[in-house]
Image: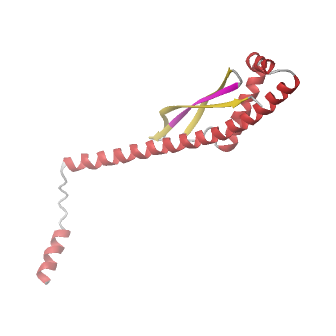
Amino acid sequence: MQKIYLHMKRRLANDRGDMSIFTCFFVMAIVILVSFLLLYASIKITCINIRNGTKMELNNLSASIYADTYRSQRETNFSEYLSTLYSSSDYTAMLEETVTDGLANKIPLSTDDYQIKNISLAFHAAGDRVEYIFSCDAEFYIFMFGRRYPAITQHIELTGYHNTKF
């Protein structure tokens, strides 16, 4: 028993340090792969959070459009509302700002890891339906050597609609 113990002790104390170059590259490849997978998962989760916050704001936008179209249909007509929607840049800018501010209250628009840019809101009318398209670019960053580098830009686009028939 003591012979086995001494043999194991000598084996464990052997500090020759002979590691093959293949082992070094293999370990490095595994570390790079795991890092890439974590970055990919982080980007996907953040995009899902941005989409969820945007969906909630588009629901609020739909309620705002509902109030405006209901009032326009009761007081004048729907075509006047559409002309306001398409011709008044102030009104569409106000709707876009409302969505942007609501989104900023739900999630930060800029962090050390990402920045949301190019937020836009477009409207299309087809019959008695108002369709709105929200789009933005989420630019993700990685930190290397004490500096921040853009890693990937993900385009995010969501479409919603509001039926104006009562």
Q: How many marks?
A: 0
Given residues 161 and 9, the one toward you in this image is 161
Q: Quadrant of residue 51?
A: top right
Residue 84 counted in the magenta span: no
The extreme left residue here reads: 3
In the picture, measured across the screen, residue 75 lies left or right of residue 163, that is right
In the shown orientation, is residue 32 left or right of residue 38? left
Determine the residue located farthest toward the front in the rendered image.
166
Left or right: 163 as drawn, with respect to 77: left
Q: Is residue 97 above or below residue 47?
A: above
- Residue 85 % position (x, y): 75, 21
Residue positioned 66% across, 27% down in the render = 132
Which sits in the foreground, 142 or 72? 72
| Magenta segment | 129-140
Is 8 placed above or below 1 here?
A: above
The residue located at (51%, 32%) in the rendering is: 154
Residue 138 location (% of width, % of height): 55, 34
Taking the image as shown, residue 58 lies to the left or right of residue 74, namely left
Q: Quadrant of the C terminus?
A: top right
